[in-house]
Image (tube, coloured by chain):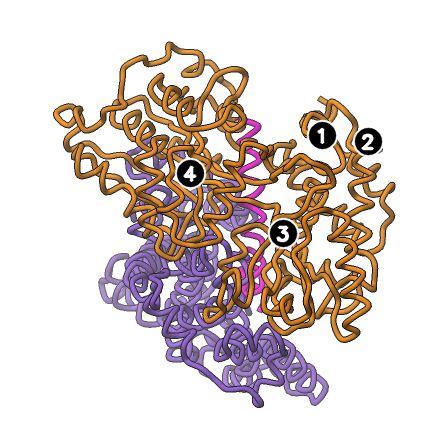
Chain colours: A orange, B purple
């Protein structure tokens, strides 16, 4: 069956091929970077999109995102107010392989009008293809009004503002079981020292369980939950400027501060007394998938699991996610008075220079959209850093808590660093070295290896 | 993750084919098509029927089917059971059809319903089978029975094209279709699948046609039949097993294809084949991963049915083509 096995190999490598095609697209697609970038910014006011009905009626805007069913229904629902009042039709397409396919589609010339980019790094790639359109003035105005400067910066490439922020998620969360905590008389820790004391206390109290559980497994992206650990802790042992410099590689990857952060993570993750609850020795973290990582909390084998707000959707259907329920999340405490928040989000890139596209982009940056989206999300699990978003419109308590964390005046929001680094590190050596680290490689070697892999150009 | 779903079909194919091979090989040795009794096929048949070879085949079959069986058992278990215990302990936990129900019709939270994508897959697969079959059988006839300059060189050229992996041609082809204005349409898929299938199809059918005694064709010519008549009335009925075997082969390939569909169908989600739906089944955050095993079995229902109903031809056709090469 030689013929048959040839076909089988072909399909097995299909995923790899898409990835390499995407890379090919990045490298060869940048021949004409000036074709649209650098053109005059459209200063027309699109903020009253409803008044533009006569101009926009009957037009179509295609949109391409990584959000698939069932979450896409909420997206489509949130466009209705815009569609109804302008007569524009929004053609929605969701694709889980979005990040690989978008650069490929830039190369074949089959780009959507609007795409939600989950990584600022991908925005840079798309700008380099020369196909991304700079944001219209009314989009920029809307973003200035509704978002913090940090967020606008992430949508900017080489001083040109391209993409307005859209949704957001909070990664600085520790999942736990409120019922179990009440039963044992534990309080939610407010400082890092309290957290470590609690960790030691749980380890001493309950021999059948461990205080922490984690899972780094995620197919080809195995290791990414580990990058979040370092980033979260670096924000806690150092200030935000150090973090920014580290992300931009203005200080080396293996800076002493990063080593300190990794050491703090290791004190939890690599101590056999403290992890990996429900799965065994700490090195099991490397093979447990991130979806499974926190599940032992439900069986009482584990007490705490650090993972982003979206982990709320991964509990089995009948789990009560509430402040006094089966599971809930607390803010990963800081080591000092600052309140750093690690998170992620999407950005709205546009690829067609047309009034209906600009009006739609303006709508997406507005408070109207954020509130419409909140109302269209009855199950929760969605959030935005849009200041115009009324927390009362958020259905889930967790989302309200996340919104409170994001808009807290003391909060310092920082984007997930691995999404900002060059992909050979942020989606490469950083992941693999974190996996090696949890498998037993020491802190220094791990950071040195990542530093060595940083592209020189 | 996306590539985790397609393997079951080839596994089944390989398994069914291996188990069928031992019986079919003997059958073929006696079958009228193989005129040379002491030929390669005869030797192969003797080699395959030795006890060691049988034991090897059984071990191979087990090695291929066990993971598939595990996946099958898993598809009937609920999320919590899958997470907490292995599939081999499944008989102590309750079975559920809920995964199948949710994967098939989207469930209560409006996930991706696979039921809506069968039609797309069928609309894609059938022309992708018929088109290369038609073109390849015509080309194979010319290569086998019409004398024209550079025939052998051209044939080697066509055969050599098999070496070129389709992944290399994908993006330029998508670009070309886009500039032709058929990007994202079914035509883009039909044409690209047909093009990728042709080298193997021509080679396979050519070998099969060469096996047909030339006296048959000469007799047809003496009776006044031209090329067209010879092709349709004499050759086509004789090569039915080869056509059927290649047809199944191509159908399975197209049905299970994800890469070509992903590249060619960008921007037209309404035309997605079932493999693309399967790819999205686990949801935006991958939290519905437990549906994918059930989804995989739903999506392979059609190719398995096609294969089982036509597998006689499949094995016979492949073996007959193989003896020549």
Labels 2 and 1: the sequence-earlier one: 1
Q: Which residue is label 1 attached to? A: A239
Mark 1 and mark 3: Cα distance apart in space: 32 Å
Chain letter of mark 1 equals A
Relative image position of residue A326 (x, y in whole percent): 55, 68
Mark 4 and mark 3: Cα distance apart in space: 27 Å
Q: Which mark is residue A451?
A: none
Labels 1 and 3: the sequence-earlier one: 3
- Which class describes the residues within 10 Å of circle 2: few (<14), some (14-19), or many (20+)? some
Q: Which residues are magenta?
A: A1-28
Mark 2 and mark 1: Cα distance apart in space: 13 Å
Q: Which mark is residue A220?
A: 3
Mark 1 residue element: loop
Seen at 58% across and 34% down, the residue is A413
- Which class describes the residues within 10 Å of circle 3: few (<14), some (14-19), or many (20+)? some
Quarter-wise, where is residue A79 in the image? Answer: top left
- Which class describes the residues within 10 Å of circle 4: few (<14), some (14-19), or many (20+)? some
Chain letter of mark 4 equals B
């Amino acid at each position: 069956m030689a013929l048959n096995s040839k076909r089988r190999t072909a399909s097995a490598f299909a995923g790899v091929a898409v990835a390499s095609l995407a890379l090919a697209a990045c490298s060869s697609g940048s021949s004409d970077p000036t074709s649209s970038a650098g053109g005059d910014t459209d200063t027309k006011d699109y903020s009253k999109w409803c008044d533009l009905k006569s101009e926009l009626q009957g037009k179509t805007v295609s949109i391409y995102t990584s959000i698939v069913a069932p979450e896409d229904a909420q997206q489509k629902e949130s466009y209705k107010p815009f569609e109804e009042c302008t007569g524009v039709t929004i053609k929605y397409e969701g694709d889980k392989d979005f990040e690989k396919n978008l650069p490929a589609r830039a190369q074949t010339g089959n780009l959507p009008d609007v795409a939600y980019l989950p990584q600022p790094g991908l925005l840079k790639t798309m700008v380099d293809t020369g196909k991304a359109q700079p944001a219209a003035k009314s989009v920029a105005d809307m973003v200035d009004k509704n978002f913090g400067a940090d967020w606008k910066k992430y949508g900017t490439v080489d001083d040109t503002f391209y993409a307005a922020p859209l949704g957001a998620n909070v990664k600085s969360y520790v999942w736990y079981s409120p019922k179990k905590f009440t039963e044992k008389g534990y309080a939610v820790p407010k400082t890092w020292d309290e957290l470590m004391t609690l960790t030691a206390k749980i380890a001493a109290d309950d021999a059948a369980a461990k205080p922490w559980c984690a899972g780094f497994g995620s197919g080809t992206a195995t290791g990414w939950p580990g990058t979040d650990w370092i980033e979260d802790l670096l924000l806690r042992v150092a200030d935000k400027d150090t973090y920014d410099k580290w992300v931009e590689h203005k200080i080396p990857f293996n800076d002493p501060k990063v080593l300190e952060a990794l050491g703090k993570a290791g004190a939890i993750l690599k101590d056999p007394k403290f992890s990996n609850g429900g799965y065994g020795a700490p090195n099991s973290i490397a093979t447990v998938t991130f979806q499974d990582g926190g599940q032992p909390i439900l069986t009482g084998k584990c007490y705490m699991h650090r993972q982003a707000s979206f982990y709320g959707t991964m509990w089995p259907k009948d789990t009560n996610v509430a402040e006094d329920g089966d599971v809930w999340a607390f803010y990963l405490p800081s080591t000092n008075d600052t309140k750093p928040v690690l998170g992620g989000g999407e950005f709205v890139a546009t690829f067609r220079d047309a009034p209906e596209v600009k009006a739609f982009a303006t709508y997406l940056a507005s408070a109207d959209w954020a509130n419409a989206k909140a109302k269209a999300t009855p199950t929760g699990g969605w959030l935005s850093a849009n200041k115009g978003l009324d927390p009362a419109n958020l259905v889930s308590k967790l989302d309200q808590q996340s919104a409170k964390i994001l808009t807290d005046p003391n909060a310092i929001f920082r984007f997930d660093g691995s999404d900002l680094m060059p992909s050979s590190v942020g989606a490469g050596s950083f992941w693999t070295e974190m996996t090696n680290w949890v498998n037993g490689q020491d802190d220094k070697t791990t950071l040195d290896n990542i530093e060595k892999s940083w592209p020189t150009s | 993750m996306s590539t985790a779903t397609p393997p079951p079909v080839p596994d089944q194919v390989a398994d069914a084919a291996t188990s069928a091979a031992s019986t079919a090989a003997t059958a073929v040795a006696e079958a009228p098509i193989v005129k040379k009794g002491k030929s390669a096929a005869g030797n192969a048949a003797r080699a395959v029927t030795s006890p060691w070879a049988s034991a090897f085949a059984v071990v191979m079959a087990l090695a291929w089917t066990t993971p598939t069986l595990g996946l099958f058992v898993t598809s009937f278990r609920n999320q919590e059971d899958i997470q907490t215990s292995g599939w081999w302990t499944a008989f102590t936990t309750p079975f559920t059809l809920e995964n199948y129900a949710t994967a098939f019709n989207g469930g209560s939270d409006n996930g991706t319903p696979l039921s809506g994508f069968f039609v797309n897959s069928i609309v894609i697969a059938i022309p992708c089978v018929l088109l290369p079959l038609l073109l390849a059988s015509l080309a194979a006839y010319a290569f086998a029975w019409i004398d024209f300059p550079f025939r052998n060189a051209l044939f080697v050229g066509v055969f050599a094209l098999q070496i070129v992996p389709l992944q290399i041609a994908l993006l330029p082809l998508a670009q070309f279709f886009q500039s032709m204005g058929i990007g994202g349409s079914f035509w883009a898929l039909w044409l690209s699948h047909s093009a990728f299938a042709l080298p193997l199809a021509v080679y396979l059918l050519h070998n099969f046609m060469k096996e047909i005694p030339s006296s048959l064709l000469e007799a047809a010519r003496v009776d006044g039949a031209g090329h067209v008549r010879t092709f349709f009335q004499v050759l086509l009925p004789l090569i039915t097993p080869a056509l059927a075997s290649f047809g199944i082969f191509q159908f399975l390939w197209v049905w299970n294809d994800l890469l070509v569909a992903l590249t060619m169908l960008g921007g037209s989600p309404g035309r997605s084949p079932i493999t693309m739906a399967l790819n999205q089944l686990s949801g935006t955050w991958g939290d519905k991963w437990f549906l994918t095993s059930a989804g995989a079995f739903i999506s392979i229902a059609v190719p398995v049915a096609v294969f089982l109903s036509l597998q006689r031809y499949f094995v016979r056709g492949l073996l007959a083509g193989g003896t020549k090469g």
